[in-house]
Image: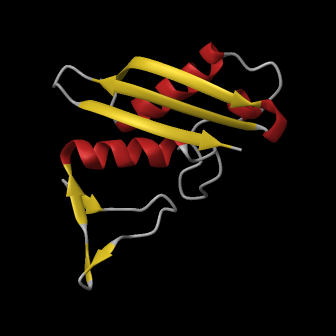
């Protein structure tokens, strides 16, 4: 399957007047970034897509709570994906959370993703 390549703002990338296409692991990683960047219930066409930002940006949040949300987002894209590595950085003063993680599945898909919320 192929899809449009998106920049960090979610805009379609053009090259020479043509839409850039991606596929395979690059497309899967982009889908994961899109899902975990969407607050559950935010998209009116699919209220179940996304993760619950209240368990990422709220008070008293633990790494396990964030990992659970990331895992939920992974499973929305591919039910066989699981977390291999997870790092969380918190900036309490600016209410910002950044994560970097890698995920893989039994088909040797390997994704490395970085995401921030504020």
Q: Residue at x 23, y 64 (%)?
A: 21
Asked if residue 50 lies left or right of residue 58, the reply is: left
Asked if residue 100 lies left or right of residue 81, the reply is: right
The x, y position of residue 31, in whole percent, is 38, 47
Above or below, 113 against 30 in this view is above
Above or below, 54 against 27 in this view is above
The x, y position of residue 11, in whole percent, is 45, 68
Colour scheme of the picture: secondary structure
Quadrant for the C terminus, please.
top right
The x, y position of residue 6, in whole percent, is 39, 62
The x, y position of residue 71, in whole percent, is 48, 24
Residue 5 visible to the viewer: yes
Q: Which residue is nearer to you in this view: 92 or 109?
A: 92
Residue 50 visible to the viewer: no
- Give the quadrant of residue 3: bottom left
- Give the quadrant of residue 7: bottom left
**Name of the residue lying farthest toward the bottom:** 17
Q: Residue at x 21, y 30 (%)?
A: 109
Above or below, 2 against 100 in this view is below
Q: Which residue is nearer to you in this view: 98 or 49?
A: 98
Q: Residue at x 41, y 37 (%)?
A: 113
């Amino acid at each position: 399957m192929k899809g449009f390549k998106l920049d960090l703002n979610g805009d379609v990338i053009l090259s020479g007047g043509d839409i850039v296409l991606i596929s395979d692991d690059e497309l899967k990683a982009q889908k994961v970034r899109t899902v975990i960047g969407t607050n559950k219930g935010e998209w009116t066409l699919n209220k179940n897509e996304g993760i619950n930002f209240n368990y990422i940006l709220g008070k008293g949040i633990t790494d396990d709570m964030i990992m659970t949300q990331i895992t939920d987002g992974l499973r929305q894209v591919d039910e066989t994906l699981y977390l291999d590595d997870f790092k969380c950085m918190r900036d309490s003063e600016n209410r910002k959370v950044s994560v970097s993680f890698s995920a893989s599945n039994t088909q040797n898909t390997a994704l490395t993703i970085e995401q921030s919320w504020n």
